[in-house]
Image (cartoon, grey):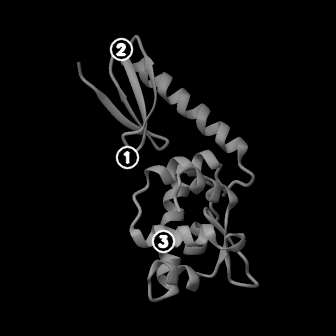
Amino acid sequence: MKIHEEVYEGHLIRANDTAAMVFIDGSKNLETKFRAISLEDALTQSKAWIDEKTQERKADRRQAHIGTVEGYTEILGITKMSKARRLMLVAHRRAEDRKMTPAELAEAAGWKTQASANTHYAKLGKEVAEHLGLEIDGTDKEAWTSALAKLDEETGELQMHEEVAEAMDRLNIG
């Protein structure tokens, strides 16, 4: 029996004529499975389940560019992180009020310049935003960083979103 695979809204669907399994894309984490009467039925059920999950999460967001704790937990749980990126996030999570400057983040990660912290934070923010379907205004580093933290214009500090911090706690990151 031939297996059909496709990526839909950040999820991998593996289906055949009798069943489907839905995984978080890029991982071996099985989220759900369905019995089906045809390949079309398997795909329809899978996509409907993913759409419902996505809509619930969007409805629960406090702002369109900020994910839910469940969403951050999902993506941070499957994201491969370098030691330096993990050190940066853990330091940020542990900081008072979850606030640090890019220079402090760079120091925590062992990088020489704050540009490295800005780049890594933005890359992670972009990956998170794309997986969760967050509405990001712009395409620069600051825009992508907004998926994870809020910039305080006066102090230059980034304050990690409470949802990200709670997701890290759930995953025992730091």
Q: In the rendered view, would you say 76 is above or below 174?
A: above
Label 1 Cα neighbours within 10 Å, binned few <14 / some 14-19 / many ≥20: few
Residue 17, image x and y in percent? 33, 16
Circle 1 residue: 26
Circle 3 residue: 87
Label 3 Cα neighbours within 10 Å, binned few <14 / some 14-19 / many ≥20: many
**Circle 3 SS class:** helix
Q: Earlier in the sequence, mark 3 or mark 1?
A: 1
Query: What amino acid does circle 3 point to?
Result: Leu
Asked whether the beta carbons under mark 2 and mark 3 sit within 8 Å of each other, the answer is no
Q: CA distance from mark 2 to mark 1?
A: 23 Å
Q: CA distance from mark 2 to mark 3?
A: 45 Å
Please indicate, yes or no, whether residue 139 appears anywhere in the rendered image. Answer: no
**Circle 1 SS class:** loop
Quick one: which residue is furthest to the top in this view? 37
Q: Is residue 67 left or right of residue 88?
A: right
Camera-nearest residue between 40 and 132: 132
Camera-nearest residue between 112 and 1: 112
